[in-house]
Every structure is written in C-alpha cells, then in structure tokens.
Image (cartoon, grey):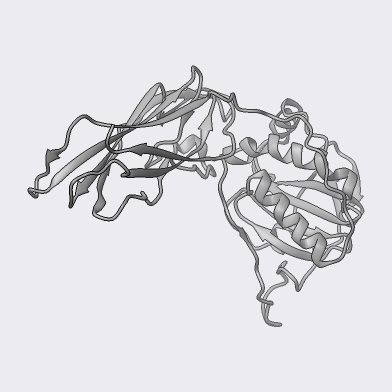
Amino acid sequence: MRAALLALMLATVPSSAPAQVVVGAESVPDIVVQTIDGDSTRLHDLLAPKLTVLVRWSTWCVQCIVDMPFLKQLDEKWRPSGVHIVSLFEQDTAVGRAREIIRENDLRYPTILDPEDKELAAAFRQRSLPDGYLVMADGKVVAQFHPVPHLGMMEGQLRRILDRYKLAYSTPEVPPGPAMRPDAVKAGLRVARGVHESETGSQSLVLYLTMDHADGYHTWPHEPVVPKEFRGVTPIHTGIGRVKSPNGIVTDRIEWPDPVPVEVLYSGSPVELLSYTGRTTVNVYLTLHRDLVESDTVLVPLRYQACDAEICYPPVEVELTVPLLN
C-alpha cells in the first residue's frame, strides 16, 4: 500500500568499479533474455518507443504482488503514449508460481527472467524488492525508484522525464482499475465533554478522532508489525500530522489504540495482520493556556492506507476540523 519517494541517483561509477547501472551514466545491457513464457528476445527489443518502467519482483515479495494492479493500470493508461512496463522476475522461487500470479492479476506487459549467470542482477545495484528503473528507448537509465511509488507520483515522474527529453505524449484517460469503496473508512473528530485538569495542573481537553471501517476493510496501525510472510512489504502507517490550533492551545500527546488481528490473503494464503478495523478511536490531548472562545477551532491532518483482504489502496490524506466550544 503505497506512499514513497522517487530517488534520483546522479552519481557516476568510477572506472575501477564493477559495471553497474547508474542513473544518467549507464544503460541496461542489450543481452538475450528469456520471457516467462519461454521465448527468447533481446532486452532492448522490449523497450518502449519512449520510456520503459522496468520493475524487479519475486514471488516472496508480497509488496510486489500488492503493486501489480497499479502497474497494470499504469501500463494500460500510458502504453498509447509510448510508455510501457517490463518486469524482471528474480528467479529464486518457482517460475510456475510466478506464472500463476501473472495470470491471476491479468498482466499483459512482458515479464523476463534473469539469465542463469545473473547478468542483469549484476548490472543493477541490489536493493530490497520491489524496485525499478525508468529506461529510455536507447537503454539509458534516467531514474530509479524504491519502492514502487503510488500511481500519481509515478505519473508525475513520467511527465517530468518526457518533458525533459522533449518527447511528446498525450494525457491518457484513466482506465478502470481497483477502486476502494467511498465509505471504506469514515473519519470523524469530536471534543470530549468538559475541560479537566491535567497531571501538570493546567487545563486539558481531549479530542476523539474516530475511524469507522466498513466491513472487510482495515488500515495499517500507527506502528505496523510486518509478519515474516510479508517480507518486502512497505506499510504506510496511520498517522496524524501537525495539529493546527489557535495560540494558547497546544497538543500535549496522542494516544493510539492497540491493533487487532485481521486475516488477509496478500501472499495467497491466510495470514493474521495486526490492523485497525471496526471503530478505531485515537485520543488527542490538548493543553489550554487560556480560556476557550467561540472562534477556537482545531485542525487535525490524518493519513492512512486502507486495505481489504487482498489489496492495499493508495494512501488517503484528510483534514478534520472541530470547534472547541460546542
């Protein structure tokens, strides 16, 4: 479920270093590769007319599988503009299972296998999966990312690179893709009744921030615990940004609830994941250094990533406001 920054690598490799792909300095090797269907082809023959999103993945990487619906949407949306996706499967698990995953997700873009001598793995700087590269039609690597950004961030990077190299493209229409229910998570904010004295002797007020999850939905908790079965997952935790309050009113502390186990199927088999589900209430404690007035209003920015049993959706950011006198 995914909120992540694209990392641009601007350094070059010294002449004494092993040959590796470095953004702006090297190209992907034009070697003969085998597709997951058993066909042989040259890697450069698979590159798109303008820009290719080359993504590395494996069957043990749950986040890689979670990302697939969004990569499929990106490929379908940008293919008419000459931007394609090619996936590189790391052969450390059964290729048969990889074919099943591709079929289950109805992926149409090509998947290639690293040669037995790991020539492609040696060409790329190894990092945890999933990661990827943006490659020009001539094989030049112009950007690198880890993990896979959400759709909007990836599209912004594609546009910037196409503009930089003066490559024409049209703004594609969005094809149907996995959609989260509008009422998957309903967030609300209210003030607890009455001002009370805090432990330090000052006046204190409590805000109740509630998240009501629809049946079948959950969100990552504030401090996610990733099960060992989900190696490679990059969770987007539920968080509260800087609380905006009037002068004389400050945030003292935030109390998060304990998550509860929820059964998910991200890896194809049931796994219990500690999550927020049902009604979740977060307590936000405010310290008052003056009396409240009618105009006092507090804004609380909330960020979360909602998931169902099979997929996590792009992160959501909302701003909740509440008058302190009501």
Q: Nearer the viewer, residue 45 or 174?
A: 174
* Relative height, residue 21 to residue 285 (above, below): below
| Residue shown at the point (68%, 44%) measured from the top left | 151
Q: Where residue 133 appears, x then y in whole percent?
A: 72, 57
Q: Nearer the viewer, residue 246 or 148?
A: 246
Quarter-wise, where is residue 23 in the image?
bottom right
| Residue shown at the point (35%, 30%) measured from the top left | 259
Residue 115 visible at all: no
Left or right: 184, with 324 as reference point: right
* Relative height, residue 133 to residue 79 (above, below): below
Q: Residue furthest front?
A: 294
| Residue shown at the point (59%, 30%) measured from the top left | 311
Q: Where residue 73 appears, x then y in whole percent?
A: 75, 37
Q: Where residue 256 appears, x then y in whole percent?
A: 30, 37
Q: Nearer the viewer, residue 276 or 164?
A: 164
Q: Where residue 16 appears, x then y in whole percent?
A: 68, 82
Q: Nearer the viewer, residue 184 or 221?
A: 184
| Residue shown at the point (83%, 47%) measured from the top left | 171
Residue 319 visible at all: yes
- Quadrant (top left/top right/bottom left/bottom right) for the C terminus: top left
* Relative height, residue 43 to residue 191 (above, below): below
Left or right: 166, with 204 as reference point: right
Left or right: 130, with 238 as reference point: right
